[in-house]
Amino acid sequence: MAGDWIKVEISTPDKPEIIRIADLLGIDQDAALGKCLRVWIWADQQTKDGNALSVTRAFLDRYTACEGFADALREVGWLMGSDGNMKLPNFTRHNGVSGKMRALGKDRVKRFRNAASVTEALPEKRREEKNKTKDIAGGPQEGEPASPPQPPKPPRPRNELFDAIATAFKLVPESSDGSLIGKVAASLKAKGAKPDDIARRMKNYRTHFPDCVCTATAIDKHWALCAEPKPVVYGFQPDGSYIDKPLSLEEADRIFGGPQ
């Protein structure tokens, strides 16, 4: 027994042997093929190679419901031997264990070759698809000159407020300071700040906060307050001096401390 299938070639229905069997029995070719299939299936299930069939011609006639069928098989050379010891010539060429293994192996080789041929064709197919995409996108087609290179985009205009903040507070835009400078510049721009305002408000900041370090974020936070310097309080100062008149910015710098 060699599985639940048998091999039949597509040319079998029109083989001369089938035509001869049909003529000998007075039946059509389809009936002759069907009866042969019944015998081959029985042999595949009951034997390993179609040999040593311990049956008689009468059994084959009954099995196929056709008197004289065994003799017809013998006539075309598809049955040999005598009652109780018959065989189907060349049965293992297509069926039986060995025949089916060869058929399966041949099928695997065919599928492998087909897969290999498809794989080899894929790069070419990808190139064709790429060319089609390029054509659709309006790119140069084969034989057409390539478009001239586009000129580089002009550099982005300098942000003067950004530069003024970086210079005044000695910050490095290329470092992590860049994010801080950008944030402060955006905030001050929203407040209407100009680059020239930075230095003046830094001076005013020191009159309001003489003990604090002047930073970019501090200027941003107290921008409105630093629009003017802090008014000077008359009287004795922490250093023991006495002030009895308004001070200039230069004098305020000297008394309250220079740039931090």
Image (spheres, helix red, strand yellow):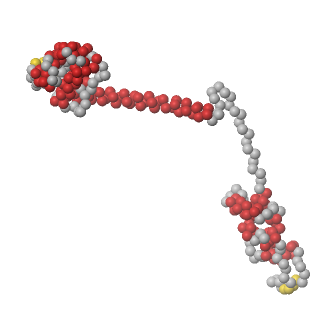
Quarter of the image where one finds residue 172? bottom right
- Residue depicted at 18% across the width and 27% down the height: 43
Residue most toward the left?
84
For the N terminus, give its image quadrant.
top left
For the C terminus, give its image quadrant.
bottom right
- Residue depicted at 61% across the width and 34% down the height: 136
Residue 114 is left or right of residue 52, and the answer is: right
In the rendering, at what x and y percent does residue 108 appear? 34, 30
Residue 241 is left or right of residue 43, and the answer is: right
- 16 or 248: nearer the eye? 16
Quarter of the image where one finds residue 105? top left
Q: Is 39 located above or below residue 149 in the figure?
A: above
In the rendering, at what x and y percent does residue 133 appear? 59, 34
Quarter of the image where one finds residue 80? top left
- 22 or 120: nearer the eye? 22
- Residue depicted at 75% across the width and 48% down the height: 155
- Residue depicted at 29% across the width and 22% down the height: 9
**Could you tell me if residue 80 is visible in this image?**
no
- 121 or 180: nearer the eye? 121
In the rendering, at what x and y percent does residue 59 appear? 11, 24
Residue most toward the right?
245
In the rendering, at what x and y percent does residue 217 appear? 72, 67
Residue 252 is left or right of residue 125, and the answer is: right
**Could you tell me if residue 118 is visible in this image?**
yes
Residue 108 is left or right of residue 38, and the answer is: right
- 60 or 224: nearer the eye? 60
Q: How many marks?
A: 0
Q: Is 229 located above or below residue 133 in the figure?
A: below
